[in-house]
Amino acid sequence: MREHEYGPSETGSVVLDLGGDTGALIIYTGRELHGREIEISREGARRTHSAVRERRVRDGSFHSAVYPDLPAGVYTVWWDDETPAGKVSVHGGGIAEFVWPSRAFPASG
């Protein structure tokens, strides 16, 4: 897991090119993941990552990682190098959303 220090994104600073077989993904997280890079991958493809940043909007702010220009398909969201946090379907022309699990993961026994 890599972490970086990023300033907030202002309203309108993220551009998504959607259409055809290209979509996007937004992973919503809590403030505690600010700067963490979250990896995603389609089956048989290399992982890609995006950093969690504060996103300022008219009504306040939230934290998320944004993945623009993704080929349509089912993506695994990775908790760490070996553990998936879940799966999400990205459709061409659309924006998929995934909420980062808020509980301790993976569950300890």
Image (cartoon, helix red, strand yellow):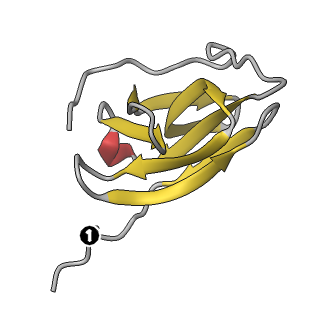
Q: Measured along the vertical axis of the image, is residue 67 above or below residue 9?
A: below
The residue under label 1 is 106
Q: Position of residue 96 (x, y in %)?
A: 68, 44
Residue 88 horizontal/vertical position (percent): 59, 53
The residue positioned farthest toward the bottom in the image shown: 109
- Residue 69 point in image, percent of width and height: 64, 21
Image-based side of 76 in relation to 25, left or right: left
The structure residue drawn at horizontal position 35% and vertical position 70%, both measured from the top left corner, is 103
Residue at (38%, 44%) from the top-left corner? 31
Quadrant position of the C terminus in the picture: bottom left
Q: Does residue 44 appear to the left or right of 74 in the view shown? A: left
Label 1, residues with CA under 10 Å away: few <14, some 14-19, many ≥20: few
Task: Give the image quarter of residue 105.
Answer: bottom left
In the displayed orientation, state which residue is furthest to the left: 109
State left or right for residue 35 relative to residue 11.
left
Q: Position of residue 72 (x, y in %)?
A: 69, 36
Q: What amino acid is labelled 1 in the image? A: Pro
Camera-nearest residue between 35 and 67: 67
Quadrant of the frame with the N terminus:
top left
